[in-house]
Amino acid sequence: MHRTTLCAAIAALLTLPCAPLRAEPDPHIPALDDVIVTATRTAVTVDDSLAPVSVITREDIERLQARSLIDLLRGLPGVSISSNGGAGKQASLFLRGAESDHLLVLVDGVRVGSATAGSVAFQDLPVEQIERIEVVRGPRSSLYGSEAIGGVIQIFTRRGRGQGVSPNFSATVGSDNTREATAGVSLNSEQGWLAAHLAHADTDGFNSCRGRASPGAGCFTDEPDDDPYRNSSVTLNGGWRFGEAGDLQANVLRAEGRNAYDGSFVNESIYRQQIVGTRLRLQAHERLVLSVGAGQSRDDSDNFGSGVFQSQFNTRRDNYSVQGDIGFAEQHLLSVGADYVNDAVDGTTAYDEDARSVTGVFAQYQGKAGAHDVEASLRNDDNEQFGAHTTGGLAWGYAFSDTLRFIANYGTAFKAPAFNELYFPGFGNASLKPEESRSVEIGLRGHGDLGRWEVQAFDTRVDDLIAYDAAIFAPGNVDEARIQGLEASLAVDLAGWALNASLTLLDPENASGGSNDGNVLPRRARQSGRIDIDRRFGAFGIGATVDAQGKRYDDLGNTRRLGGYATLDLRAEYAFSPDWLLQGRVSNVADHDYETAAFYNQAGRSYFLTLRYRPAQ
């Protein structure tokens, strides 16, 4: 086709009559809390999304008086959590029963996580630096590539609120000699914004592990001392709007500190998490929006044993993306784009390979016709090591009425092995293949004057699961899994009480055909639920959270059973002026002893008091 003909065809496409393309919103603005951008990489409301999504806002974080990111996410639909102790200790999140590394995590659009371990240090991402969280359940590799088997979690950092100059401050004291402080300032106008926030947390902690050296168990050592944790962080966020032509924004998050834990070889780390990103969005045409993004995340740690330096691991992930959203008919949107990710590792361990790159291209169609909604997506990832890998997704929604909707989803996904699994000296297996999955889901969603509810049933098959293979003394693609589940959530207002409840019933079954066939996958509770209830009485507010988890097993053989438990948290607050708020929380009121990983202690009854300054807008 001649160049002039091609240009004419594109021009004709862009001038077809259609509804104006809705510009992607800024997810930090509280007025747009019902709008999400993670499920489809475009702007849709929670009710219009064909994927199940949970949204947590800054207002929720402060109302719940959340102690950490893990504390905030526990008990959400489809979420299981395992923790190796108290504040700052390693935590794993299993979304819809998938492995903890079968989850893609983004911070302000930038991929994060350790390239060596293949996991995300949730414990080191400060909750006081978070403005908003979107949790998308179900496969999303057809939009994002590797890792998004169980779903995607996107975290948006603090930006500020209102117009003009807005400072904020908080101070917290609590159990285990906990001391925390935050301070920030933001400048917002119609043309742009600029914000900076500082946070520091320090706690003496408690004994994380009741392990033993012989016979080996837990952390394989007996260190009955407190395990302190310290975290200092800063976020910077700025942007400028070019009228209706688009906007440019940039963001930085850096968190660093020291973490002590129990271990036979290494028992202390100095860590650094850093995420830097920028994005340019242009309204190139009335029906075409172009977005270009770049970012880098770093996960670094220096590790010590009894005060003596032992090792260093530094990983870097460079991210680049371009996306075009084209409205080609009324209520029809086509998105096409490309991502480039380069992972690199450095430190004291010599890997056979220390870098790899992935280039992914994708296309997505979203359309609406009467009561029907359709989404279809296709993606191809060209991995420098594994070659090409294609994934797809298809979703259909049908509105029985304005308040009741049926949804069905099907998607495939994959996860590329991490550097440790491939190349760690004396352990890695360079012949590993990517793990693959296919999922099907149906659900109902409704809303009324009192609130909204939804329920989903899903079935996920995962092939070529990576696990330790005793025959070769290395990781191998030896396992398979079938994960079935039911999720339900409810958010209503009853006689002035705000009630949020969720329930997850999970059957995470090992389907490898070997000796563990039919066993429950480790560290997932088969039943879990959470209830949050809150009410205001003028300047006073009270609330409670109940988190209930069924039994789980700590090992593949299901020989080590961890009992179920339920915890109750109580909270209260008093706004003694429009700008000042005093908050108090009691966690684990009944002082229950429980474990989410064998031999690792969890916090008992704890008390916290917080003073907040946040000028009324």
Image (cartoon, grey):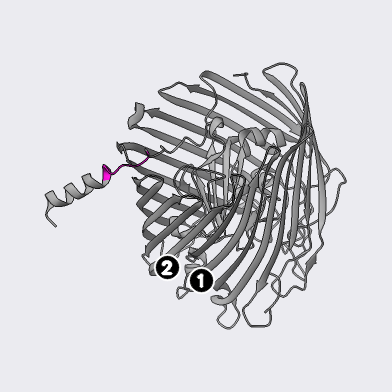
Does 570 sit left or right of 270 as displayed?
A: right
| Residue 426 position in % (x across, y down) | 52, 72
Q: Earlier in the sequence, mark 2 or mark 1?
A: 2
Classify 146 as above or below 428.
above
Query: From this viewpoint, which residue is outermost toward the right?
Result: 590
Residue at 35 percent of width and 52 percent of height: 336
Query: What quarter of the picture does the C terminus occupy?
Result: top right
Q: Is residue 115 magenta?
A: no
Mark 2 nearby-residue class (10 Å; few <14, some 14–19, many ≥20): few
Report the amino acid beneath label 2: Asp
**Which residue is identified by label 2?**
352
Residue 7 percent across, percent down from the top left: 17, 47
For image coordinates 48% across by 64% down, the residue present is 419
Asked if marks 2 and 1 touch (Cβ < 8 Å), the reply is yes
Is residue 233 at all visible to an observer of this figure?
A: yes
Q: Is residue 345 visible?
A: no
Q: Magenta part of the protein: which range?
A: 14-19
For disc 1, the marked residue is 428
Give above or below for 521 relative to 210. below
Frontmost residue, 16 versus 411:
16
Q: Is residue 101 left or right of residue 484?
A: left
Drawn side of residue 325 relative to residue 560, left or right? left
Residue 346 image-quadrant placement: bottom left
Question: Where residue 183 sits in the image (x, y, percent)?
Answer: 60, 26
Q: Residues within 10 Å of mark 1 (few under 14, many from 20)?
A: many
Q: CA distance from mark 2 to mark 1?
A: 10 Å
